[in-house]
Amino acid sequence: MRLTVAQALVRFLANQYSERDGTLQRLIPGCFGIFGHGNVAGVGQALLEMADLMPYHLARNEQGMVHASVGFSRMRNRRQAMACTASIGPGATNMLTGAALATTNRIPVLLLPSDVFATRVASPVLQELETPGGYDVSVNDAFRPLSVFFDRVWRPEQLPSALLGAMRALTDPAQTGAVTIALPQDVQAEAHDWPSELLGRRVWHIPRPQPEPAALARAVEVIRSARNPLIVAGGGVHYSEAVEALRRFAEATGIPVADTQAGKGALLWDHPLAVGGVGSTGSPVANALARDADVIIGVGTRYSDFTTASRTAFQHPDVRFVNLNVAGLDAVKHAGVSLVADAREGLDALTDALAGYRAASTWDVTAWNRVVDEAFTLGHGPLPAQTEVLGALNEEIDARDVVVQAAGSMPGDLQMLWRARDAKQYHVEYAYSCMGYEIAGALGVKMAAPDREVWALVGDGSYLMMSSEIVTAVSEGIKLNVVIVQNHGFASIGALSESLGSQRFGTGYRYRDTASGMLDGGKLPIDLAANAASLGAEVIRVRTIPELRAAIATSRASTRTTAIHIETDPLAPVPSSQSWWDVPVAEVSALDSTQQARKTYESHKAQQRPLLGPPIGRNGS
């Protein structure tokens, strides 16, 4: 069939399917895009001509459309991935942050940036980066370290191998992320005779790797030796749809379950074996168990510094790790006993192999639940505390609603306090913690789960970074609920700055004081509610928690994208996780506040451990 490269690309993508557990679905169900001179006559023309094959969604920000794609794929447990096309130059490089976020979170997304002329007939073209070291380099080479797969199609004949390699990476459960195919703008429009095999229906089977028997035996031996083990449930539990397998394993063994940001909801908050988040923003209950645990069973976690409290969370002198993970990279962390397998299959195998084993751990969440109740109903004034806003939302929304967040102080408060009542209720992007993800990510979540209400929780800092996809939601008729928390600056970094002796310098949205020369004057007259209204959202302004509760009900009942605006006190108290996060403090300083913070830092630093485990014998024990 004679088609242009772009037309063959679109037809190919429309015929790709993924399959797992007998369920077949479109692998690439749609394409986000913003057209420019680099792709409007190539991919843009193909999407127009083949609109019945590939739905097109006009985004307003290239980074935002990648975030929306990540939200979509994560909600679909990585079984589907959206495509994103952008023009050459700034349109393409605007997607770099989104690419980094996707790969860091290990969520598949297909990026199709336009590129320079392959023929070089008109070089240097508009927006072309010229480098004296070679003419085959463009700005798109910046995608290479951010992508799990990268290719550039200089000739039509190269398209088939690029596409097959891209689909392989998108459906790889262990090493997926951003997949980039750079498309020179002249090649996009070039015609070629394509084999029918390339354009026909193709099914990509997403595997469930089984645990290797010897590795399973080693893991069972270590777990059976444990008196006080702890499970750390990560995002892999969700992506492998292993929630029920985790519950069965925990109930059969009596091992308590702590969770990471990506793993939140793997065991619902009120289950007797659920002990809350672990690490820097976790619960004191989980962190107390982590300090004394002799065996940590990590399931689908990559052990970020927040999870390990910068390697201070696990203090047992002989602590050992058993790591069940589909990715070998994560399975060997902390010199752990490696069990490379699908989380669901691995948990089921462990449950069978550990028949008769019961952990001896004891804990009590009663006191902590009272602390959470108090934080949710603090009665702080005159402005409410952020924890009260989260508490009202947690209590007023339905169990199947989804909360979306990413950056600032809210991820910490959410992991510590949020009571997940559904496995997919909690959606916090915290591998890259990207400001501006919230509204765009919520758009993707809603597209993936149109039967659920989706709540984007966004601080004023993140809102100002990126609110443009409100327009996309409005234009597509996709209803979002946006809660704008106004605290006049960067509340999270302000608190961190203060704890590190830097006195909240540069973290408030203030006028510059002409006398001091510092940005410590009066508050800026920013009206984010008016801004949201100007983008097409219905807006509800509230001042109190009772008003907020009423607004939540109104927003939930509406059929239109609605923004609720509330101002909070960034200095309101938050419960302590009784944990730590390693952020270096100046070793020398003339400021007393910095000197005192350095002493505190050094005392925590002394608790860090290499987590290399005990020496390993010949039999692996």
Image: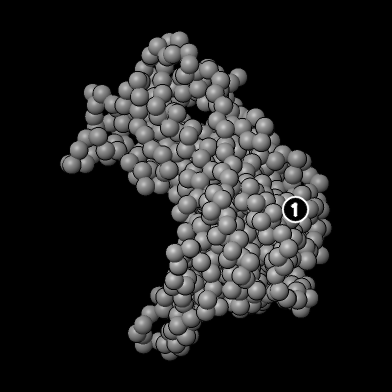
- The N terminus appears in which quarter of the rendering? top left
Q: Is residue 13 above or below residue 561?
A: above
Left or right: where 312 falls relative to 483: left
Residue 212 place in picture, x, y as percent:
54, 49
Which structural element holds mark 1?
loop
Q: Is residue 300 above or below residue 107?
A: below
Q: How many marks?
A: 1
Residue type at tag 1: Asp
Residue 382 place in picture, x, y as percent:
72, 75
Q: Is residue 399 above or below residue 180?
A: below
Residue pictured at 61% horizontal, 32% vertical: 19
Residue 605 place in picture, x, y as percent:
45, 80
Q: Nearer the viewer, residue 165 or 550?
A: 165
Q: Is residue 222 visible?
A: yes
Task: Find the residue positioned furthest to the left.
Answer: 132
Left or right: where 549 falls relative to 519: right
Q: Is residue 282 visible?
A: no
Left or right: where 215 falls relative to 42: right
User: Badge 1 is on which residue?
Assistant: 422
Residue pictured at 58% horizontal, 66% vertical: 222
